[in-house]
Each structure stands twice: as C-alpha cells, then as structure tokens.
Amino acid sequence: PHAAQAASDGKVDAILVPIPHFGAVLLMDDWQRLATRLEARDDIDWLERPMVRFQGEPGEQATLFIRDPSGNALEFKGFRSLEQVFAH
C-alpha cells in the first residue's frame, strides 16, 4: 500500500514541509551530488525542489523533498558542517 498524503504541513523558514517525513543529513558536497543526480531525472516526484534555507545564518542548510515510490515524503539536507545541524 502507498503512504497517505502528508497528514499536515509545517512551516520551516516560511516554507511548508510535509509532516510526517523521513530525513537524512548529508555534508554539502554529498548533498549537491545527490541534488544534481535527482534533477537530471524525469521520474522524480518533487515535493520541494532543491533550495537553501536560512542563507547567511547559523544553521544554513540546503534541502529538497521528494516522494518515494511508496508515497513516503523524504527530506535530504546538506550542511557545510554537521555542527550546524541543530542551530535552528
């Protein structure tokens, strides 16, 4: 069975994000490679295309949201330093 649509949305830096979702944290170089690979495909179910949140602030992060083939919302975040993960 496919996962249901997100039960609700929450705001992060004025952007609505699906709740619930599964997330993975990557270093920025790895995140950029992943984002480039996903953007090159035409079969990705995008919820939020790659973007940068909190630009120039502590905790600056790159993020993207996709839906997997089972309908689950997945978030991938990129940080220049993992020490910044909980800055926001």
Image (spheres, rainbow, N blue to C red):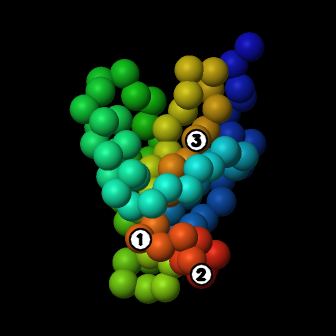
Cβ atoms at labels 3 and 1 below 8 Å apart: no
Crowd class of label 1 (few under 14; some 14 to 19; many from 20; radius 10 Å): some
Task: Check disc 1 and report the residue beneath it.
Answer: 80
Seen in the image, is 4 located left or right of residue 51? right
Cβ atoms at labels 2 and 1 below 8 Å apart: no
The amino acid sitting under disc 1 is Arg
The amino acid sitting under disc 3 is Leu
At x 59% / y 50%, what residue is drawn? 24
Disc 2 secondary structure class? loop
Work out whether residue 53 can be spotted: no
Does residue 7 lie above or below 51 as drawn?
above
Residue 12 found in image quarter: bottom right
Q: Residue furthest top?
A: 1
**Sooner in the amino-acid sequence: mark 3 or mark 2:** 3
The label shown at residue 74 is 3
The label shown at residue 87 is 2
Work out whether residue 68 can be spotted: yes
Residue 86 found in image quarter: bottom right
**Sooner in the amino-acid sequence: mark 2 or mark 1:** 1
Q: Quadrant of the N terminus?
A: top right
* Residue 17 point in image, percent of width and height: 58, 54
Seen in the image, is 20 located left or right of residue 35? right
At x 50% / y 45%, what residue is drawn? 65
Closer to the camera: disc 3 or disc 2?
Answer: 2
User: For the image shown, how many numbered marks are present on the structure?
Assistant: 3
